[in-house]
Image: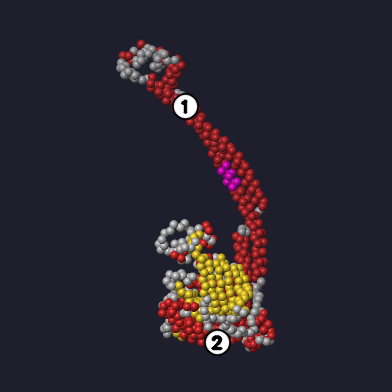
Amino acid sequence: MSVLGNEVVGILAKRRKGGPLVLSVEEVDEILRGLGVPLLGTKAVPVPLRATRIHFKGTKWLDPRRAEAQGCPLVDAADLPVWVRLAEDNRTPLMGSASAGAAPETDQPAGTKARVPFQFEWSPQPGVNGIGSGRNLRGKSTLLNVLMWSLTGRCPQFQNDVRGWIEHVEVGWQVGAEQLRVEFDAVNGVATGRVVSVTEVASVARTTVLGQFDGADFEGVMGSLMMTRLRLENIPVWADTAARVHAWPAYSSSFVVRANQLDPIVGNEQTIGVRMMQMFIGTDWAPVQAAAMTARRGMETARAAAKDKAQAAGEAIEASRKAAAKAVQDVQTKIADLPTETPDMRVMLEAANHASDLSREVHRLEGRLIAQQSLAETTRQQLKAVKARAHTRYEDALAARFFHHMRPSVCPRCAAQVTPERQAAEPDKHECSVCASDLNLEALQSDVIVAASVPHEIAAGLIAETSRDDSEDDGAGEEPRDEIEAAQAAVTAAETAVAGLTTEIAELTRQRDAAAARAEAGGELLAAASDRRTLELDLARAEGALAALTQSSNPRAVDPVDSVELAVVDAAEQVLKKWVKKDQGPMLVQISADIERLTRSFGADNLSGFTLNGAANMALLENGVDQSYSGLTDGEKLRVKIATAIALIRHGYVEGIGRHPGFLVLDSPSAEEMPLEDFDIMVKALQDVAAEAKMQIFVATRNAAPLVEHLPKANRVVAEGNSYVW
């Protein structure tokens, strides 16, 4: 029987909502075990973690114009490693490449690189270790990245060229009393190697392989080895809709404080800031509380998901009800729009037959109409021709009469005078007074002037025309008029026949259309009757579906959570929350005081009244005004975050509790608005804290002067001027 189970039984027995729940301690323990909640708290004892040796080597591929490359062998572009060629193709600048105009022109072929081997080795010491340089981009962060690469198993964010330069790494670690060595070869950031335990027997080093890795499994190997040796426990949390377990990556990331990553105040994982703080403070029941909270949130999420599912199903049924009701209404509307008359089949068929007969008669008459219209057109053309011939004869007669009765006074050709004597002599001399040609005596008797040389037929015709003209003048010549009148009568008769046929066709068409309309109306009524039968069937089906949906009730949520289990884990969380708060309350007071002392020693004299609460939130005063951690400037945040990390470590080591291994990396702390004098104060303060709490702290900065002034030579690696750290 567990203490936790006994407390839970007491709470359940006093429960008001839902009535008391009577369970035995054994039953409660069984339920908690089944939910993955430990029954006992674990005493947290810090295990020291220290880096004892850093060694890495490789090859730099530099521009031949750089001073560092002088005297080194040159390699043509085609013989360069693949990653170097890719960097050149993508125009990726290599670290430390000469700036434009800074180096003299050379006659080296484009793409040629100098092969510069390098190696670095350093044995960091306990306490504060400094890495400095006179300028940026001189390899400080690379050294820290190599250190953390060997610890976490995850390749950091190197520059592309530097990641490819590093070919072999060896880092020695002391974990408690055990010596470990992480050694691996690297190809453009992909590590292959092993972790060995090193022991000395009679001054002879012996190694035992603890784990091997090849690429992606490096992080898993380091996590499994370090979590057990540092006595760190998994941190279960509920994120969104699933339980997640944070382990070595979350812990190892909290060992590093970077100037560009200041939230949250504890660690670097926003979602587990509270859990990380509880783990490092060393509260015995913190891991159990995390497990209980994760189990309870999982149950609540499952219950909420079931409720949402039932609600969605109910909404779907309601939507189906509305759709069914609308379908009934739509069918009823369509039925109401149909005509109510019943078609008379006999009348409809008689009208259809009559319309058919009339159509045939119209067709026949239309044929006759076409023939009659053609005949009328022909008679009109004939009338036009008769009139044209009569007109021509009339004009010819007028011309003959005009010209033969002319008495010209001059010759139309030579303009010689035609004397009256010559004109008077025509009947006697029988010759033309104009051309002196002999005249036709027979024609002359008819008062027709024509030469004797003109053929007889023409002369006779002229005589006849003249005679006809005279007779016409006397009212004779009825034949042409008869011909025209006959043609006109034919035209009138034809047009009368056309008009009669047109009238008859129009009447028959009207009768046919009326009969067809009667037949069509009957057909529409027949179709409407058919549609009505179909719609009535549809209405019956729609009403049946609506009735079924109306009678059915909305689905109820099937609770996937055992209410007894939820009650047990909820009660356990209440107990654990109270225990954790009771244990960490006094500790948080001490830690808050340490944070304030350290922050002020780092140069932030304007900050005071620090209070770190159980939710990992920081309240404080800034110049006497209430402030929070999130409201501070980045420079102030950096000081407070470093102070918080050190206070948690110091608390654990001074009190002999907690889970922080006392290893801390500060990357470029002076980058955030920290004057040189404040950084100098911070270095001295870090030395005091490290000596008191037996920590190992790495500080990388461009302000190297405080490192040289305050740190022993063995505790620092400093590149002065334009030099490089490695």
What segment is highlighted magenta in the picture? 505-513
The stretch drawn in magenta includes residue 399: no
Q: Measured along the vertical axis of the image, is residue 279 above or below residue 211? A: below
Occupied quadrant, residue 82 = bottom right
User: Mark 2 highlights which residue?
Assistant: 655
Q: Quadrant of the rendered structure where residue 40 is?
A: bottom right
Q: Position of residue 631 (x, y in %)?
A: 45, 78
Asked whether 130 or 640 is in front, the reply is: 130
Which of the two labelled residues, at mark 2 and mark 1, occupies the earlier sequence position?
Answer: 1
Q: How many residues crowd mark 1 within 10 Å: few (<14), some (14–19), many (20+)?
A: few
Can residue 227 be seen here? The reply is no
Label 2 and label 1: CA atoms lie apart by 146 Å
Residue 441 horizontal side relative to residue 485, left or right: left
* SS category of the residue bearing label 2: helix
Amino acid type, mark 2: Glu
Q: Residue visible at 42% across and 59% down?
A: 105
548 relative position to 596: left or right: right
Residue 548 is at least partly visible in this image: yes
Number of dots carrying numbers: 2
Residue 511 part of the magenta segment: yes
> Residue 296's spot in the image, x, y percent?
61, 79
Q: Given the image, on which type of amino acid does mark 1 rest?
A: Arg
The residue beneath circle 1 is 389
Magenta residues: mostly which secondary structure? helix
Closest to the camera, between mark 2 and mark 1, is 2
- Disc 2 packing (10 Å; few <14; some 14–19; many ≥20): few
Q: Is residue 444 above or below residue 667?
A: above
